[in-house]
Amino acid sequence: MDILLASNNAHKRGEIQGIFRDLGVPHSIVQPKDVGFSFDVVEDGTSFGENATIKAHALYWLLRGVAVAGVTVDPEPERVAQAARARWGSTFPPVLADDSGICVHALGNEPGIRSARFGNTEDAPPLTDAQRNRLLLDTLSDRGDRGAHYVCNAAVILEEERFVQAQESWYGVITTEERAGNTGFGYDPIFLVPEYDATVAQIPQETKDRISHRAKAIGRIARALAWVGA
C-alpha cells in the first residue's frame, strides 16, 4: 500500500522507507513528485505537532482538489486531484507528514521548529546544511552545556476526522567540530550519540533507522496503521 509523504525531502523519504522496511511493514513511501505535482506549505505552527498536521492536512486536501491557505502548488489543485484519481481511483492513500528539529539546551531548546531555517535572513539565500552546522558550532563555542535532543512529530491522516499522531525524541551532545560520515543529513554530523561515541552521520543508516527520534515516532505510526487496518 502507498503512503503519500508530505515532503519534498529525498533524505527524509529514504529514512522513512528504511524504517518501514526495518519494521517489516510493506508500505511504499510516495512523494508528490511521483504523482506529478509539487507543493509547499507555510509552516506557521508554534510546535512540531502543529506543523506536522498543517503539512498533512494541506496534502490531504490537495488530493481532493482543494488548496488550503498557505499552500503553493503546481499544477493547479484540480489537476492534482485528477492525477491522484488516475493513480489511486476513489480510495486515496493515507497522508503522512513529520516535523522534526534539533533542540539545543543551552539555547533554550532553539532552534527547535526553526531548525531548517536556522540562520536564514530575508536578504540572503537559505543556508546550506553545512553552513547551519557551522553557525551552531560557532554559537556554542563559549558554552559549557552541549546537551541537545532531536524531536520528531509524525502525523498520518486516514480520513478527514481520522488521524494518528506521535512524538518522540533522541538525546545526545553537540560536538565541538563536525564529524561527518557516510549517512545522515542536516545536523547529523554534529549530533553525537554517546553510547556509540559517534555522530549520527557516522553510525550505519540501518542503526539510525532503529533508534532515532524519527524511527521511534514512525514506529508508533506504523503500529497504529496496522491496528486500524490501514
Image (cartoon, rainbow, N blue to C red):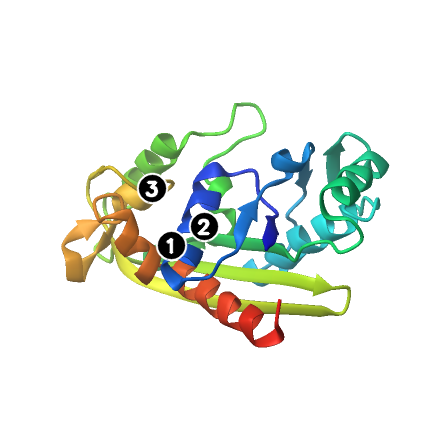
Quarter of the figure with the C terminus: bottom right
Dot 1: few (<14), some (14–19), or many (≥20) neighbours within 10 Å? Answer: some
Mark 2 and mark 1: Cα distance apart in space? 32 Å
Give the residue type at disc 2: Gln
* x and y, in percent, of residue 67 in the image: 81, 44
Mark sitting on residue 17: 2
x and y, in percent, of residue 8 in the image = 56, 38
Observer-nearest of 116 and 74:
74
Q: Which residue is mark 3?
A: 136
Tell whether 90 sits left or right of 114.
right
> From the viewer's perspective, is residue 153 above or below residue 78?
below
Q: Nearer the observer, disc 2 or disc 3?
A: 2
Q: Is residue 153 left or right of residue 51?
A: left
Q: Quadrant of residue 50?
A: bottom right
Label 1 sits on residue:
107
Please, what secondary structure does the residue beneath circle 2 have? helix
Instruction: Name which of mark 2 and mark 1 comes first in the sequence.
Output: 2
Name the residue at the bottom extreme.
Answer: 227
Q: Nearer the viewer, residue 38 or 223?
A: 223
